[in-house]
Image: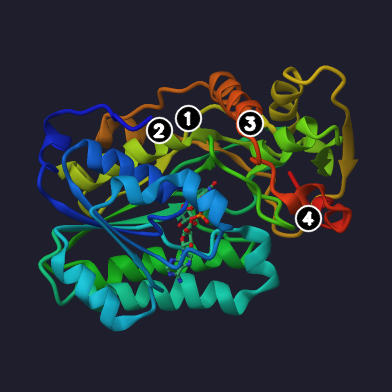
Amino acid sequence: MVDAPSDSRTRRLAGATVLVTGGGGLVGSRIVAQLASHGAHPLVLDSFDAYPHAVRDRFEVDRHAAEVVLGDVRERATVKWLTGRADFVIHAAAYADVAACTRNPDIAFASNVHGTQTLLDAVTETAVKRLVFVSSASVYGDGTPAGDGPARFTEDRPLTPISVYANTKVWAEHQVRLMLEGTGTEHAMVRYFSVYGDPQVPKPASHSWMVPWMAMSAHTGRPIRLNGGGRQVRDMVHVDDIAHATILALVTDEMAGQTVNVGTGVPTTVREIAELIAAHYPGAAFVETPRPEGDPLGGYADTRRAAALLGWQPGIRLADGIDRYVAWLKATPGAVPDWFTAPAAAGAAVLAA
Ligand SMILES: NC(=O)c1ccc[n+]([C@@H]2O[C@H](COP(=O)([O-])OP(=O)(O)OC[C@H]3O[C@@H](n4cnc5c(N)ncnc54)[C@H](O)[C@@H]3O)[C@@H](O)[C@H]2O)c1
C-alpha cells in the first residue's frame, strides 16, 4: 500500500521535507512511500547494508524519495547537511535485529547509540519542528509467563530491557527526551510491537521477523521451528499500519513529548502465528527448538494512548496480513534468500522464529 489514509493532519505534510533515517529498510521505506503519497519530500539516509541488493530493490525506496543518501547516521557532516534541510525527522535507522545486537554489541552501540547521538547533536542546531524516534516494545522486557495471562504493556510500565538491542532503545529514548526537551524541536516516541508484511525477509541467524521465517520454511518444505515451544506472546502489527501511525506521530499536536505503543492490542502466541501460516501449506510440520537468548516471553500493547492521542487503530487483521504475505511469497520468484536453503544455514535456522 502506498496511498495512506489522509486527514487534515497529514495534509500539513504537503511540501514539507522529512528526513527518514533508515529509510532504506522495511519500515523506513514504507514510511517514505506514504510520506510521498501525502505530498511530502522524503529524504533518506541509509547505510544500505542490512540486506542484499535484490531485497533493497523490492523496497522501492528510490521511486518514492526526493533524495536518497547512502551513508551512516554517525557521519556528522552528512547528518548536519540533511537535518539542515529538513522540517521533520523520523529516526528509524538501527541495527534492528535482536540476535545480531547480542552477537555484536559494538555494532549495536555504534548504530543505535552513537548514531542517535550524532543525529541529536545535528538536530539541536536546526529548525527541525519535530523528531519522531522509532523505539520498540522490547524496552518492556520479558513479560509475564502464562498463568495470569499474557502481559499487557502500558507505556508507563518500568522499562526492564533483557537484550542489548532493547537496552540501546531505552538509552536512545531517554537521550532524545534529555536533549530535545526545552528546545525548538519537539519529540515523540513510537514503540513498535512485532512488525511484519511483504516484502519482509529474514536475516541470517536471527530470531526476529517470524512471519517470513515461518512462511519461507513452509514454502521450501522445511519444518516450522517453534522456539521455546512457541508459547511466547507477540502483538503482530502490519508494516502499512506501522508507517501510518508513525506519520501521525509526526503531525499530531497532542503527540509532542509523548510516547505511544504501536500495536494491535491483540495477543497471539508464536504457535498461533505458525498455525495461520501452516494453513496455507498443507502438510506443513512443526519442530520445537530451544528459546534463544534475548527472546522475550512477550506481551501485547495497551493501545488506549495511541487511540486517544493519535486517533489511530490498525486496519489489517493478522490473518489478512498473513494471507497477503503468503500470496506475495508465492508470486515472487527469488523471494527466499539463497542462504536460507543452503546447507550451511541449517544451524543458523535453529535460532529462527
Ligand atoms: N521490525 C520490527 O519488528 C521492529 C519492532 C520494533 C522496532 N523496530 C524498529 O523499527 C526501525 C526499522 O526497523 P526495520 O524492521 O525496518 O529494520 P530494517 O533492518 O529493515 O531497517 C533498518 C534500516 O536502518 C539502516 N541502518 C542501520 N544502521 C544504520 C546506520 N548506522 N546508518 C544508517 N542507516 C543504518 C539499515 O541499513 C536498514 O535499512 C528500527 O529502528 C527498529 O529497531 C522494528
Q: Is residue 239 above or below residue 250?
A: above
- Who comes first in sequence, dot 2 or dot 4? 2
At x 64%, y 35%, the residue is: 333
x and y percentages locating residue 293 in the rendered image: 75, 59
Q: Tell me the tag on residue 241.
A: 2
Quadrant of the rendered image containing residue 281: top right
From the image, which quarter does the C terminus lie in? top right
Ligand 1 within 8 Å of disc 2? The answer is: no
Q: Is residue 308 left or right of residue 215?
A: left
> Mark 3 belongs to which amino acid?
Leu
Q: Is residue 135 above or below residue 216?
A: below
- Gap in Å between the C-alphas at discs 2 and 4? 28 Å
- Eye-nearest disc, 1 or 2: 2
Quadrant of the rendered image containing residue 187: bottom left
> Mark 2 belongs to which amino acid?
Asp
- Gap in Å between the C-alphas at discs 2 and 3? 20 Å
- Who comes first in sequence, dot 1 or dot 4? 1
> Mark 1 belongs to which amino acid?
Thr
> Mark 4 belongs to which amino acid?
Pro
Residue designated by label 4: 292
Q: Which secondary structure lies at badge 2?
A: helix
Q: Which secondary structure lies at badge 1?
A: loop
x and y percentages locating residue 78 in the rendered image: 28, 77
